[in-house]
Amino acid sequence: MDQKSIDSYEKLAKDNGLSRRQVQVLQTLKNELGMGSNRMIARKLGWDINRVTGRVKELRSKGLIKYAGDFEDKETNRTVNLWKVSL
């Protein structure tokens, strides 16, 4: 990630009162996945999924990420939500 992107996320975090973990989820969606499920985000970050779901909910309530469609998760045999950054 270049310095301009880092500066943008730092400003976003400051302006919106985001935690470091919320910023990490945003960066992962925007710069690495494009869109992803909670499980995809957790894997990319090396986190437990329970650590991701709360951050996704918080970011959705702030209007920073939004629903991007459904995805059939072959591992769980369930249809899950995909998320993307709404900036």
Image: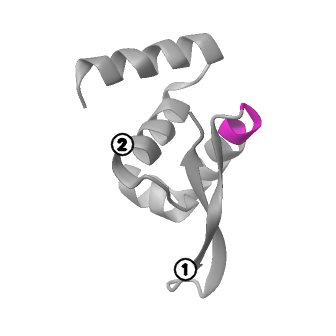
Q: Would residue 79 be found to the left or right of residue 39 on screen? A: right
Task: Specify whether residue 60 is painted magenta.
Answer: yes
Task: Find residue 58 and report its image quarter.
Answer: top right
Q: Position of residue 83 (x, y in %)?
A: 59, 54
The circle drawn on residue 14 is: none
Q: Main secondary structure of the magenta part?
A: helix
Q: Is residue 85 above or below residue 39?
A: above
Q: Position of residue 73 (x, y in %)?
A: 54, 80
Secondary structure state at the residue bearing disc 2: helix
Please name the residue that numbered disc 1 is placed on: 73
Task: Specify whether residue 57 is painted magenta.
Answer: no
Looking at numbered disc 1 in the image, what kind of residue is underneath it? Answer: Asp
Looking at numbered disc 2 in the image, what kind of residue is underneath it? Answer: Asn
Q: Residue furthest left?
A: 2
Could you tell me which residue is drawn at 42 percent across and 37 percent down?
27
- Front position in the image: 73 or 19: 73
Q: Is residue 55 above or below residue 44?
A: above
Q: Would residue 75 be found to the left or right of residue 50 on screen? A: left
Q: Position of residue 68 (x, y in %)?
A: 62, 58
Q: Residue furthest right?
A: 61
Region in magenta: 58-62
Q: Residues within 10 Å of mark 2 (few under 14, many from 20)?
A: few
Colour setup of the view: one colour
Question: In 3D space, how far apart are the residues under numbered discs 2 and 1 (Cα atoms)?
Answer: 22 Å
Q: Mark 2 vs mark 1: which is more N-terminal?
A: 2
Could you tell me which residue is drawn at 44 percent across and 22 percent down?
9
Could you tell me which residue is drawn at 45 percent across and 52 percent down?
47
For the N terminus, the quadrant is top left
Please name the residue that numbered disc 2 is placed on: 31
Q: Determine contact: label 2, label 1, CB under 8 Å.
A: no
